[in-house]
């Protein structure tokens, strides 16, 4: 028996509708995909990073995990987001505290080991303190405290080197005496002239600036909503059109009593297929 033309048209229409639906779903999925920037973060680190990225006009989200946090962005903004965070010195380094450095792990520690731990702990504490200053992106403190020789009365003074990376336009000259005073008062036997502070401004072109969302970012949400509504309308229209074609082919007429409740309320314009 020869197949009815309406049945062939109906199947071709359904096949095309399925292909269009699949492409729409793939497009919606790709638009919602996010890429992880950093993971294993504290909540404070994640909040700082998300705030900086959003102020720079980049998409960013904080993801809560079981024991830590992560920051994600869109794949198209990944490279710019990494560059922006590096320019701001984020995520901030987690410094070792005195309690962590001197955590007892054995029964006996050599004097050299204890001294090395003390120098490291003092450097970490000072670096952490200087990094908390507004405008300072990165701070490092290197201490040199010579060990006193028991058979010599000659005292070798200690010294310290301080590295500061700061935001462009910051008045570092007024900050250097305060940094020196802070380091001198934290290290025993360290003279004021023994502290060297070297400050470097971050490149201005690397610094993030507040930006308005681009045209694609502004249209992303409306496009997603329109795509979802269009997909739903296409499915409803496809079901109505196929049902009417099959009803005509089987000679059942076009009575609305056979329509499902969902399709019964959909208006059909004059001149459309099935009218």
Image (cartoon, helix red, strand yellow):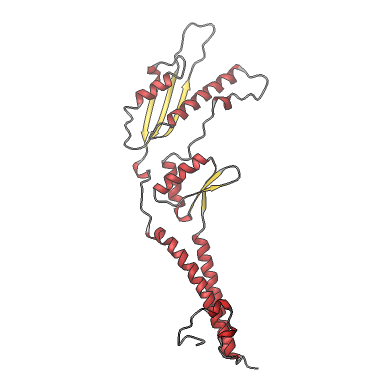
As displayed, is residue 42 above or below residue 78?
above
Q: Position of residue 259 (x, y in %)?
A: 58, 82
Q: Position of residue 229 (x, y in %)?
A: 48, 69
Q: Is residue 43 left or right of residue 130?
A: right
**What's the residue at 54%, 82% (across, down)?**
241
For residue 270, which quarter of the picture?
Answer: bottom left
Q: Is residue 27 left or right of residue 164?
A: right
Numbered-mark total: 0
Give the farthest residue toward the bottom: 1
**What's the residue at 58%, 85% (across, down)?**
257
For residue 116, which quarter of the picture?
Answer: top right
As displayed, is residue 84 above or below residue 160?
below
Q: Position of residue 137 (x, y in %)?
A: 41, 36
As displayed, is residue 245 above or below residue 214?
below
As displayed, is residue 19 above or below residue 128?
below
**What's the residue at 34%, 38% (across, down)?**
168
Figure quadrant of the N terminus? bottom right
Q: Is there any visible trace of residue 121 in the rendered image?
A: yes
Q: Is there any visible trace of residue 7 in the rendered image?
A: no
For residue 214, which quarter of the picture?
Answer: bottom left
**What's the residue at 42%, 40% (across, down)?**
88
Q: Position of residue 250 (x, y in %)?
A: 61, 90
């Amino acid at each position: 028996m020869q197949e009815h033309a309406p049945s062939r048209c109906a199947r071709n229409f359904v096949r095309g509708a399925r292909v269009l639906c699949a492409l729409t779903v793939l497009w919606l999925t790709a638009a919602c995909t996010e890429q992880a920037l950093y993971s294993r973060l504290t909540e404070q680190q994640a909040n700082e990073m998300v705030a900086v990225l959003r102020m720079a006009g980049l998409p960013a989200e904080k993801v809560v995990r079981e024991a830590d946090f992560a920051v994600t962005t869109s794949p198209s903004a990944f490279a710019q987001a990494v560059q922006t965070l590096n320019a701001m010195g984020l995520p901030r380094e987690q410094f070792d505290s005195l309690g962590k450095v001197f955590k007892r792990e054995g029964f006996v520690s050599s004097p050299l080991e204890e001294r090395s731990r003390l120098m490291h702990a003092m450097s970490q504490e000072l670096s952490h303190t200087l990094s908390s200053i507004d405008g300072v992106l990165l701070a490092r403190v290197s201490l040199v405290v010579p060990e006193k020789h028991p058979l010599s009365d000659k005292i070798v003074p200690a010294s310290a080197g301080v590295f500061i990376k700061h935001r462009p336009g910051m008045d570092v000259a007024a900050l250097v005496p305060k940094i020196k005073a802070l380091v001198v008062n934290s290290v025993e036997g360290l003279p004021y002239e023994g502290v060297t502070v070297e400050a470097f401004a971050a490149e201005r072109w690397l610094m993030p600036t507040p930006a308005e969302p681009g045209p694609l970012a502004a249209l992303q949400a409306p496009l997603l909503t329109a795509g979802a509504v269009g997909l739903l309308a296409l499915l409803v229209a496809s079901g109505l059109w196929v049902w009417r074609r099959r009803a005509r082919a089987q000679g059942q007429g076009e009575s609305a009593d056979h329509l499902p409740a969902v399709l019964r309320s959909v208006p059909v314009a004059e001149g459309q297929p099935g009218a």
